[in-house]
Amino acid sequence: MNYKEFKKLYTASDNDISRAVFLKNQGVMRIKKEKTAVTNLNKIFAAVFSISYNKGYQAMSMRDLSLKTGMSLGALYSYFPGKDELLAIMQTQARAMVKGTLKEFSNANQEPLARLRAVIKAHIFLSELFRPWFYFTFMEARNLTTKGFEAVKSIEEHTQKLLSDILVRGDEKGVFKSGNHELTACMIKAMQQEWYLKRWKYTKQKISVDKFSDHVLEMVEGFCLAD
Amino acid sequence: MNYKEFKKLYTASDNDISRAVFLKNQGVMRIKKEKTAVTNLNKIFAAVFSISYNKGYQAMSMRDLSLKTGMSLGALYSYFPGKDELLAIMQTQARAMVKGTLKEFSNANQEPLARLRAVIKAHIFLSELFRPWFYFTFMEARNLTTKGFEAVKSIEEHTQKLLSDILVRGDEKGVFKSGNHELTACMIKAMQQEWYLKRWKYTKQKISVDKFSDHVLEMVEGFCLAD
DNA sequence: GTCTATACACAGATAGAC
DNA sequence: GTCTATCTGTGTATAGAC
């Protein structure tokens, strides 16, 4: 699977995320019409990413957001109860998306090696498709409340286990070498994260997402595959 | 080399950093006595790390810092011209420390494999010894001015080149496989960074810095060593 | 649903006594 | 060198007109 094929398989877009946010948070937002809400949520999220990419979420003021979206302060506050809650909503939505997608790609493959490849690539490709969401989730996790941060740790452990389970299974089947599978899973996650945390570097070096993900897999397979 | 041996070889401490900051910034700080300055800079840096670890540098107010250090607002401002400058000073100092140390450990080894091992481990061990500095440098780089951020990119590229040069040299000598050495260097850096970015995870899983660094080396050697 | 105007808390920074 | 007191700008959030 390469990135192009991934995008054919996986057709979700920013619009779908905004719609999901609207449906989940109807209780707290004063907007009732779906179409209006989705349009403006798209604008709000795009503005948040654009502003906080450079100076961080804390340093982004509501006035910044108002200016960038073209919406007034009053209008913004009818989409979310407060700045902290907006952050929490976005983080929660991002986590749900990742969890769902990885499960989907994991289930589509039974053999350990094929499953490992699919899960690793799906994660990298998903982070390419929704890059701002991934970067944001990582960098702004600290600004969450304790409960929110627990959820961050929880998904980190969940995706680690998804990988280590595959490694253990492959080990039992004789496809993979034995070793510290938890640590190997951590290394895989570290390499995946590199793609969206240091995107400027790969743009500059003209390394495509396909080249990058192939290299990750080469390293992982070089280390994991039984002789 | 393990972490214990590293600490015997490399005896720098927080005190040395504070002294270096004092000496380099005598032009901008109103404090003249070295001993006073070093003592209080130690307090200031420790407080900055403690506060900004949870909520980020932007969200830390000067009043927070005053409370944590036990120094008044007025006193703080005689150690640095402003909050932004304090950040810049800390980031600059951290970069100088990393650059110097890696060079030292690189030069101490001539053979590509020995040099690769030394540089990789030195970086991980250094990040363990000065963990708050490393975490802070990464997470708060965004809050720097354009010029400051250029410096961040510059050291990222510098350490990447340090690694890729070793790989190229070993490739020529027939010790390492050929391949995309730049990308491999990126992967190594990603794994190293993992150690200080997700320290909570390794504390929880009771994985020591020696175990971690050995695993990184195993993966790298498994991929790089010629048959 | 969206706007303008505004409340009020808290930020960074400085002056000047000690 | 360090303190207290204070200036001034900006932050989040809300009320109420349209």
Image: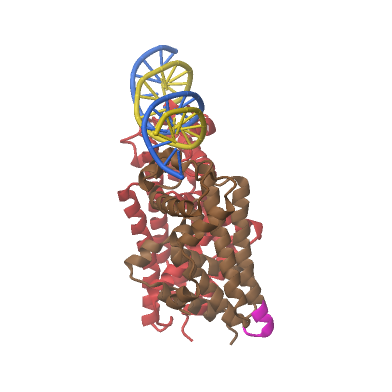
Chain colours: A red, B brown, C yellow, D blue
B173 in the magenta segment: yes
Which residue is at the front of the view, A4 or B23?
B23
Which residue is at the front of the view, A165 or B222?
B222
Q: Is residue B25 left or right of residue B53?
A: right
Above or below residue B158? Residue A30 is above
**What segment carries the magenta color?**
B169-175
Residue A89 in sight in this render: no
- Residue B135, position in %: x, y? 46, 58
Which residue is at the front of the view, B104 or A155?
B104
Residue at 45% over, 71% down: A116
Q: Quadrant of residue A214?
A: bottom right
- Residue B69, position in %: x, y? 38, 47
A221 in the magenta segment: no
- Residue B200, position in %: x, y? 36, 62
Main SS category, magenta section: helix
Which residue is at the front of the view, C3 or A129?
C3
Above or below residue A170? Residue A90 is above
Residue A13 in sight in this render: yes
Residue at 61% over, 46% down: B146
